[in-house]
Image: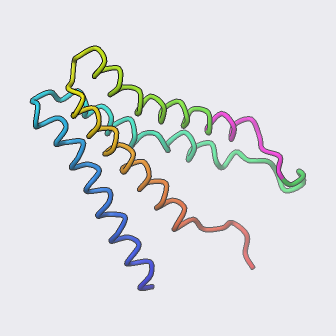
Amino acid sequence: MAAGLKTVILLSFVLAVGFLLIILSCALWANWLPLLVALTFVLAPLPNALFAHCGADDFSSYGETSAPVDLGRFLTAVVVVTGFALPIVLAHSEVIRPAACAMSIIGGALVYGTIQAYAAAFRQDDEYE
């Protein structure tokens, strides 16, 4: 129980730092477009979570995945790549500053990494032992 509480506290601290970096990348230069990165990384795990339960049945061989699971992984990858590419494109077109680009990428990576770490740390297996 104590290990779970320590994990939640650590993950919430890292998530807060990630959102702080994203908000600072917007507020320091008075341009709120990098806030789209936070929305992108928060919505990134959604397709994978929705399609994860559409897996193969109990009679399929080990290692086979179904098409909906692969579609969910593909859509998640597209959204994650968009989250990293959007600030780069905005900085390249001089809509935001390069420092804001770096801060929003680092903050977005922390947000997405925290969501994935939380999902991995508290994943419950469907099988009962």
Give the residue furthest to the bottom.
2
Quarter of the figure with residue 91? top left
Question: Residue 40 at x, y = what percent?
Answer: 38, 35
Question: Residue 87 at x, y = what percent?
Answer: 32, 28
Quadrant of the drawing holding the C terminus: bottom right
Q: Nearer the viewer, residue 44 or 18?
A: 18
Q: Is residue 54 magenta-colored? A: no
Give the residue furthest to the top.
93
- Residue at image location 44% in from the left, 81% down from the top: 3
Q: Nearer the viewer, residue 25 or 64?
A: 25
Vertical placement of residue 92 versus 49, above or below: above
2 horizontally vs 76: left or right = left
- Residue at image location 41% in from the left, 33% down from the top: 84
Query: From which residue to which does the magenta span run?
Result: 63-72
Quadrant of the drawing holding the N terminus: bottom left
Give the residue furthest to the front.
98
